[in-house]
């Protein structure tokens, strides 16, 4: 028999800890559930583990003492490599706490080392992994934390970590694709604007002054360019400042009030092209999360709640939660989603067919893939539109400047010939 140390939630909602003997982890989970306990964490207990905990706790105190005034900045970029290392170690049989401590000891990156020590400190304080991650929300998003919580409750943490890592990698590739697609047109557009500002504020005024000194007459194009130069020097800084202030005010309204967040997210969904991209991003994540949770034994009600938290758009999240309420009242998945109008008709038809044929899990997986494919197409379309507009603006601006320079030079030539 193997002794397991567990942390669980009692039927009264209180935290319970203790030890239980079973032949394997699965049997230990079954015994806890029979006692009415909801497992949060269960690990094999041994002398070596106890000694390790004492030693690691001492190491944490030493680390904290020497690093009180030396904190490295932690960001969301640390999440993916950390989860990747944690998955490799935990999947090979190492308990979570020891795996995190090993990461903190082995990695060279100061930020990763600090993250590992921070999580280890919270774990030794009696928190679960999800609770520990919740102490650093700027590194781990709420969706990942809720998934980790579900994985700990059911003892299926490895597939949860694996799936989360796949989503992180997919998001990273999408971001890189967007950056790569917009880098060249952004560079060209910036160069064209820079050359344009230099031309209208330096070159054309000098040519105009030279033409006037020689008795030449100003032309309409040169006058327009000089007016543009005055705008760039005097009005543009003021307009830019006002736009920055307006943008900051909008950001504050959106992020500091629930009404602002809801309204701005609703407007975003109605925006052409951008709305469909936002919808595909969130539906791909939510369907993948729902598939994963149902596959690992989470109840449909809890799975719907957790998949709603995978959605960043507040309007879509609220409608997912409304669908969860309808599901709780006895509606099928298809009817629950239909009442809220959060899904397109194609998705509703596929979910209805999946429920009637007993293949809902594979349907949800397929829907996640379909929305991911639509997202890739949407990004490519958006990149093409932005690139075309940027290059068109750059070419038009350069052509106009060249024409203005030619006209100015022609005026100077005519003035010289007249003299």
Image (tube, rainbow, N blue to C red):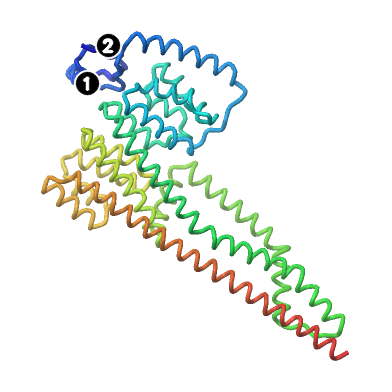
Q: Going by the picture, which residue comes out furthest to the left? A: 357
- Above or below, comparing residue 411 to residue 358 in the picture: below
Q: Label for residue 122?
A: none
Q: In this view, does 31 lie to the left or right of 273?
A: left
- Above or below, comparing residue 159 to residue 411 in the picture: above
Q: Which residue occupies the foreground of this view, 24 or 346?
A: 24
Query: x and y percent of residue 153 in the render?
Result: 28, 26
Earlier sequence position, callout 1 versus callout 2: 2
- Above or below, comparing residue 322 to residue 225 in the picture: above
Q: In this view, does 399 lie to the left or right of 343?
A: right
Q: In this view, does 221 lie to the left or right of 282?
A: right
Secondary structure of the residue carrying tag 2 is strand
| Mark 1 vs mark 2, CA separation in Å | 12 Å
Q: Label for residue 19?
A: 2
User: Tag 2: Cα neighbours inside 10 Å, few (<14), some, or many (≥20)?
Assistant: some
Q: What residue is rendered at 28% in x and 49% in y?
A: 368
Query: x and y percent of residue 208 in the render?
Result: 79, 77
Q: Label for residue 29?
A: 1
Q: What residue is rendered at 49% in x and 12% in y?
A: 58
Query: x and y percent of residue 194 in the render?
Result: 67, 63
Q: In which quarter of the image is the N terminus?
A: top left
Q: Is residue 204 left or right of residue 101?
A: right
């Amino acid at each position: 028999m193997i002794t397991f140390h567990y942390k669980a939630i009692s039927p009264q909602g209180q935290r319970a800890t203790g030890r239980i003997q079973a032949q394997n982890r699965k049997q230990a989970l079954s015994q806890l559930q029979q006692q009415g306990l909801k497992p949060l964490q269960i690990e094999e207990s041994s002398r070596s583990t106890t000694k390790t905990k004492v030693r690691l706790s001492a190491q944490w105190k030493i680390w904290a003492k020497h690093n009180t005034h030396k904190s490295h900045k932690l960001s969301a970029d640390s999440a993916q490599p950390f989860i990747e290392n944690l998955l490799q170690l935990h999947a090979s049989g190492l308990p979570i706490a020891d795996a995190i401590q090993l990461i903190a000891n082995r990695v060279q990156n100061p930020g990763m080392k600090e993250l590992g020590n921070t999580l280890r400190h919270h774990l030794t304080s009696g928190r679960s992994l999800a609770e520990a991650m919740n102490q650093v929300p700027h590194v781990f998003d709420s969706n990942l934390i809720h998934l980790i919580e579900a994985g700990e409750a059911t003892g299926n943490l490895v597939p949860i970590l694996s799936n989360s890592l796949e989503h992180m990698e997919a998001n990273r590739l999408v971001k890189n694709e967007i950056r790569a697609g917009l880098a060249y047109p952004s560079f060209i557009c910036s160069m064209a604007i820079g050359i344009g500002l230099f031309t209208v504020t330096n070159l054309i005024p000098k040519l105009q002054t030279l033409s006037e000194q020689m008795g030449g007459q100003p032309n309409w194009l040169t006058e327009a360019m000089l007016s543009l130069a005055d705008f760039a020097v005097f009005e543009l800084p003021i307009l830019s400042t006002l736009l920055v202030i307006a943008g900051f005010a909008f950001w504050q309204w959106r992020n500091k009030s629930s009404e602002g967040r809801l309204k701005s997210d609703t407007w975003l969904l109605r925006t052409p092209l951008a709305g469909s991209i936002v919808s595909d991003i969130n539906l791909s994540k939510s369907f993948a999360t729902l598939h994963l949770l149902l596959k690992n034994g989470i109840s449909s009600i809890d799975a719907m709640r957790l998949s709603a938290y995978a959605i960043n758009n507040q309007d879509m999240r609220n409608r997912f939660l409304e669908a969860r309420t309808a599901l709780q009242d006895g509606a099928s998945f298809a009817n629950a989603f239909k009442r809220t109008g959060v899904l397109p008709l194609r998705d509703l038809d596929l979910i209805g067919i999946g429920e009637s044929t007993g293949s809902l899990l594979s349907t949800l997986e397929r829907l996640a893939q379909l929305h991911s494919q639509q997202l890739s197409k949407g990004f490519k379309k958006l990149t093409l539109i932005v690139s075309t507009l940027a290059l068109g603006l750059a070419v038009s601006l350069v052509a106009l400047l060249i024409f203005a320079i030619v006209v100015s030079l022609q005026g100077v030539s005519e003035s010289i010939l007249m003299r």
